[in-house]
Amino acid sequence: MHGLGKVSQFWLSTLLLAGCLTPKPESTLVQDAVSMPTPLNKTYGLTLDAVDNLPAIVEALKSLPKKPWVRIVFDYPRPPGDYAAAVAAIAPYAEIVGQPSDSTYSGKMTVDQYRARFAAYVAGLPQIAIWETCNECNGDWAGKATSAQADAATDVVKGAGKKALFTPYWNTDTCADKNGPYVAWIRDHISDKVKTQSDYVMPSVYGYDCDGPEPSYAELDAMVATLADMFPHAAIGIGEFGKQGDAAILQHYLAYSNANPRYIFAGLYWYGAQDLVPKSAPLWTVFRSLMQ
């Protein structure tokens, strides 16, 4: 969860929904979609910050045309047993990404506590193959120990033979917090271990929280190229994104692609529980239609 908060924005209208599938030429969000190459391994995903409505979640997932990635936020300090039933129900219909610590929780834990939490979750939920080792580590709201926490979680995840996802928080020079631009922070604070052992790198991208509009496709291209250089063995994608009820932002990212052979997208849309469940929700239809 990004530092300025994911505030509910229920302004989706029927006209916007219709326009989402056939964007108007003057749109500033949807650009160059026709000319973008189609990658070999494009995946689609969403985030669930709650699993209370489990039957509707399962029905929505099983009705999608492709098996998505589903990142489940495991609320601190709840133990893994609280999520066992949900994980078992979702696992047949999704590639689950486990998130034992959202950035809003990281500062509440010491490095040892963070390591212990990951160890408990990785052992307690063995169905999950991908674990997010650090969420928005470069954000100044995430605490001062995120670099060491990323190292500790990477040790746990890789030691268990699982895959590690690293999630920085995208920003620009003009909207960076006190920790500064994300590229420089990663370069100076993230260890070679995390850079070389991460299997996936997928930044949170919230343009409306930064300078204004969502980053252009050219800006996303530059981000992918930069991260591919910094993390030489990782697949690169989009992590968190979205604005609740905003179909145009959803389409902007789902229409984006990249020629880099290590680009896989994923796009772990933050408002999955709110906008993509149940499957009668308007944005579920948009999401399904845009899965290619």
Image: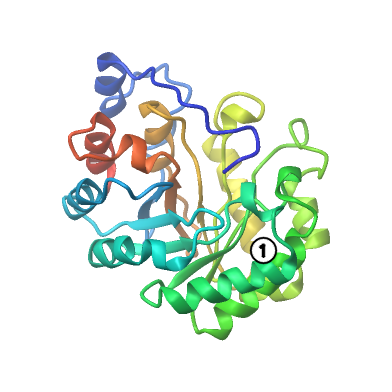
Answer whether residue 63 is visible to the viewer in this image: yes
Give percent across and percent down for residue 72: 42, 56
The amino acid type of the residue labelled 1 equals: Asp
Q: Quadrant of the N terminus?
A: top right
Quarter location, residue 23: top left
The relative height of residue 224 versus residue 41 in the rendered view (above or below) is above
Q: Position of residue 237 (x, y in %)?
A: 50, 55
Q: Pick whichever, 238 or 97, lies toward us.
A: 97
Q: Nearer the viewer, residue 26 or 95?
A: 95
x 35%, y 36%: residue: 274
Q: Identify the image quadrant of residue 205.
A: top right
Report if residue 198 is visible in the image.
Answer: no
**Residue for point 56% across, 25% down:** 213
Check disc 1 and report the residue beneath it.
Answer: 229
Q: Quadrant of residue 209?
A: top right
Q: Is residue 3 above or below residue 237?
A: above
Q: Nearer the viewer, residue 33 or 47?
A: 47
Position of residue 103 in the picture relative to residue 48 (left or right)? right
At x 44%, y 49%, the residue is 268
Q: Is residue 191 above or below residue 5?
A: below
Query: How far across and how far down the image is residue 212, in percent?
Result: 61, 23
Q: Is residue 81 left or right of residue 156?
A: left
Q: In the drawing, does residue 121 fall left or right of residue 190?
A: left
